[in-house]
Amino acid sequence: MNRAVPNIRHLRAFLAVAESQSISAASRKVFISQPAITQAIAKMEKALGVPLFDRRPEGVFLTAAGALFHDRVERMLRHIQAGVADAMRASGRRTGKAMHNLDQMLTGVQLRALIAIAEAGNFSLAARAVGISQPSLHRAARDLEHLAGVPLFEKANRGIVLTRPGEVLAMQGRLALVEYEQGLEELAEWRGDDSGSVVIGSMPLSRTFLLPTAINMITRERPDARVEVIDGPYEDLLNGLRRGDLDLLVGALRDPVPIGDVVQEALFSDPLAIVGRVGHPLGQKGVPSVADLAAWPWVVPRRGTPTRTHFEALFTDAGVERPGNLVETGSLILIRSLLEASDRLTMISLHQIRHEMRWGMLAPLPLDLPATARPIGLTVRKDWRPTATQARFLTLLREAGTVVHAS
């Protein structure tokens, strides 16, 4: 994500004016002169392309656009405050003036430098990402470390890594910048620009019908909307969600919820089945036994996935040795090709192969797999507030889930 570098000092002034409804009162609160605040607000309004305040003789009041932006700025600064508090705890310090005041003194360039170093592990690459010279980035990083009063960076074999306080500060810093960027998107939507964005972490069970249906609908309704779909292992996607790189995850839910800062919503329940090519020999002999299944080669997902756990339990519970001729993959395209061209079997959701069944390529064996139904749905950050485009996409996902549930 191309994160902008906001002027945090100006954002604090904006909040102070909104809360006091007075530039003079805000000036006393944030220790910035009235002319400087007036100039900062005017500069923000020009850059954002919207009026943030309605100036009246009795005071200055937020416009509708200003209220939208105010909420995002508040959320942004709360993340910075949380990051400073988390970093203090991680450092083992209970008190400390420098760290205590860090959220008030931190600049946008310092925050972006911290995040860029965390992602690049190298001052030169980080400077390129931020768009400043390497000496300037190095100075911003060291100034931030001096303000914090604790080490935030340390040398590693291949560059620079963050200390634990640096990591937790960068984590909340990423989320702070996400809030700022979403504030910019909301203002664009308020101006009538429908080019909002949705970044989705996609797991296998969402790719056949659920995601394509919702994506086609949102792009028909909002042709300029930007939709990005990221595939990967669940652990990587979850990390991306928590860092703010992804807006939501769609696929099989976990039980229990893997960590306390995300929430899950089930859209439908999806049972597993034993599947082979149409005309597979086992499909011609009635209900197969577990021993019958063990005699054939299989293609299975990698270890640690829910389906792999069910596959192994099927044989363990029956006291039958598991098949040895296994191919491990999470690729539906490869699974389909292997099954079509051989007598391999797989354990997979029927929803995931609905097109292959409709086309007469694959078919389930007549064997029920009790207690394998899994909730399929979406996962988001607990405190996430979607933009209008993202909220509409969630609605379309829920509608698509209702169609799957009814079919």
Image (spheres, rainbow, N blue to C red):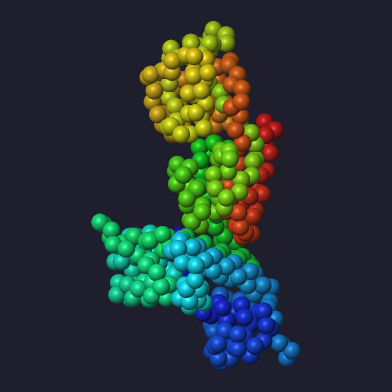
Quadrant (top left/top right/bottom left/bottom right) for the N terminus: bottom left
Residue at the image point whose x is 35% and y is 65% from the top: 153
- Give how far across and how far down residue 71 sits, in percent: 63, 69
Residue 32 in sight here:
yes
Which is nearer the eye, 17 or 162? 162
Q: Residue furthest right?
A: 58
User: Does residue 15 appear left or right of residue 306 in this picture?
Assistant: right
Residue visible at 64% across and 75% down in the picture: 66
Q: Position of residue 367 (x, y in %)?
A: 58, 16
> In the image, is residue 206 above or below residue 66?
above
State the residue at coordinates (67%, 79%). Answer: 19
Most extreme residue toward the top is 285
Residue 76 makes an appearance in the image: no
Query: Tag count in the figure?
Result: 0
Q: Residue at x 58, y 71 (%)?
A: 73
Q: Residue furthest left?
A: 157
Report the quarter where the C terminus lies: top right
Residue 121 vs residue 58, the one in the foreground: 121
- The quadrant where residue 206 appears: top right
Residue 91 percent location from the top left of the image? 43, 64
Residue 281's x, y, as percent? Answer: 48, 10
Name the image quarter holding residue 31. Answer: bottom right
Answer left or right for 346 relative to 139. Answer: right
